[in-house]
Image: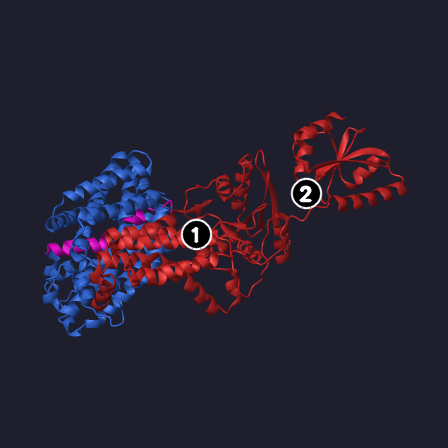
Chain colours: A red, B blue
Amino acid sequence: MDPFIKELKEKFVHSDDLFLHEEEILDVPVLLVGFKSLIDFTKTKVTLQKYIDTAISSQKTIGELLNEIGEVKEKDLEEAVSSIMTGKLLIISNSHRKYAVIEPFHNMLNRAIEPPTNENILQGSLSSFNEDIKTNIGLIRKQINASNIRAEFFSVGSEQKTKLSMLYFEGQADKKLVEKIRSSFEKNQDREINNLQNLAKSLGFSGWSVISKVNTTELPSETVAFLRKGRVALFVDRYPFALILPCFLWDMFTLENDRNYPIPLMASIRLVRIFGILISLLIPALYVALVAVNPEVLRIELALSIAQSREAIPYPALVEILLMLIILELIIEASVRLPSSIGPTITMVGGIILGQAVVEAKLVSTLLIIILAATTIANSTLVGIQNSLAVRLFKYVLVILASIYGVLGILGGIVLISAYLASIETFGISYLNLNYAKEGTKNG
Amino acid sequence: MDKSLHVVLMYLLVHLGLIFFLYPNDIISSSDEGQWMPIAIGLLFHFVLVWIYMKGLSFFPKQNIIHIYSEMGKGFATFFLLPVFMYLMLVNVIGVRAYSEIITIIFLSNTPSWAIIILFLSISGYLAAKGLEVIFRTGILLALIFIPIIFFVLIATFQNVDWNYLLPLIDDDFHFMTTPSYMKSFSAFIGGFLFLGFIAPYLTYNRKKVLMAATLLIPFFVFAVYIPILTFGHGTASRFLFPYIMAVDSTYINWLMFDRVTMFFILSLVTFIMLHLSLLLWMAYQIMNHWFPHQPLYSILSFTIVTFITSIMIIDWKAVERLLWWNSFLQFYVLLTIPLSIYFIGRRRKGRA
């Protein structure tokens, strides 16, 4: 046997989905090699047969035929292995010292283009990205018919290669930004990218930032809007999201789809989201501050009724609220974890606990339940799950400061959070930037 | 890049923080009638000094006052910058101590003031260590969140105004000029603009816009004094330590669930003061960095520790007042010499060129 084929076999030992199929093409014995799991063999063979038939009628040699249908290469084991891994069909002839790499029919391993699962959209285009990087870029090209859209491909990782792609609008995106992203990928060529933390490392971000420095969206329509404003979109193969760089605070409150409504409605929807962040940050902390430290701020009737509702509760406001907040976090986490068929159970059980039983057992006050409900609902109004997670975390900073310093603690906490947000920079662009589009065009 | 908006907002915030606490009492106790005259004179000082300072700085584009003085020679730089450094540290100590005392007096009577000082210093130290641009950006966020509250309260305080207290309009003997409390009131008039000379290489601004911001401040300077007088009359108002805050306390808003809007008002101002403190720490670091180049973290950490220890050693409000009085001399010295010297150095350089 050819030593090359032997080596190839050794490389894929115990890979039972590898096929080595002996065949004769134009009377030359060849070996077809590939993965059954990746290649639709029947279809590929039928097509191959058609090529062979035309080759017979036009009297081509096998070399000419292989050159026509694929890429002929010298026998190089490394390259052959990586071609097989990416789902190519190899035609190896024993007599020649060459093999051909052919693009076969693939098994359908991708989802169809479906409506978004993580972001809901009202009155807007519904298709969302899926796991295949080419499909995603195709979606973008379909969404916007522009010749100045650029798609650069990178392949990173030393052992497992991951395909990455960077999309931007030529002339719209800041050239310096594009160059910085490109060079950071080139510099970290050997770093493997299996998740967003890896990607952040590759881009040179700290992994400890609470606020995510990339904005994620699974909607081509949103992505195109970002691109048009001079942002850069990254795609990672097998990750069904566009990663938008740079990311700004204002993105928490805006969706491009808002612009499908009249301006007053758009403005009020966005105002609701701003209230959302304020309420989910402030209300739990205000409860602790007003109950435990500064009750005199409240109107006397209100203060009395709150005191009455807390009459039989045996622990301080901080413990009370932390207890309930943690239960609430557990409910949210559990409803993400559970399969959707038993998900509603959690809602029901949680509803019973939070709604009635806890109050009747005099473990927490009724007011607290209202506050928790308001907080959770308000938190969900923010755009982007990574943003609402960050706000959920910030809430605890304020609650703890409020339990020590009262209202002063809340305001101090706001300064602290503002300072933190102000200190975030992505490639030298501040997180608080409001008119990036204008500046971007100026630089581009 | 032109960052006028950042600078203008910071200018407003810093001054708003200064105006509403000590300044109304200083003005009210300095003169019995026609308080607009001391205010007008103070404002005149404010405008003239800010104008001279900015004019002087405009001779040196992209340079801050540390660069300007060090170009003139080492001894020269030390002669001017040492008092500035001392002034910054002193203002920092007094600021931290005075505002923690004010907060204790007004509503956190059970919290020890060292705990409040720790909160103040840790937040402003964190901000200062992050650098100038972060301070200014934080300023914008805070302005967006808190300026509406301040405006709301300011309008609400007109509720109990009796316009008859406006009279008599004229104070004809100018005796307020010689009172110590009038001297102290200048910390509000001239205590807030020093930072304009430090930010040059990082942020640039339009001089006209800053002057417009200063004009915007005039009503605040006037209302801070006149609202308590128009609410209580001069006789009563002069007995309060914080007349404006008492005036806010006396308002009653029917539909609001809060009884004391004062707290939100004061605390909004306190956040501006935290911002001011971080700016002071950063300026002190800049001077220190000029003498001994180093990382910001070290000096800001040591400044906050020094400030903490010194402010703990100040025992009561009387001591704070005494310090304020001493500080007003240093303040006059620094805030007269710096703008004037910068102006003359600039003029001379321009003349030579």
Q: Examine the structure image and report whether residue B185 is included in the region drawn in magenta.
A: yes
Q: Nearer the viewer, residue A279 or A432?
A: A279
- Total marks placed: 2
Circle 2 residue: A38
Local SS, label 2: loop
In the rendered view, tell whether residue A195 sits above or below residue A3: below
Residue A151 % position (x, y) = 61, 47
Q: Quadrant of the C terminus of chain B?
A: top left
Q: Nearer the viewer, residue B278 or B343?
A: B278
Type of amino acid at the residue the image marks with label 1: Glu
Say left or right for A114 vs B87. Answer: right
Crowding around mark 1 (Cα neighbors within 10 Å: few <14, some 14 to 19, many 20+) is few
Circle 1 residue: A333
The magenta stretch is B179-203
Q: CA distance from mark 1 to mark 2?
A: 35 Å
Question: Residue at point 47% right, 69% down?
Answer: A265
Marks 1 & 2, CB-CB < 8 Å contact? no
In the rendered view, tell whether residue A279 sits above or below residue B309: below
Q: Nearer the viewer, residue A346 or A228?
A: A346
Residue A31's quadrant in the figure?
top right
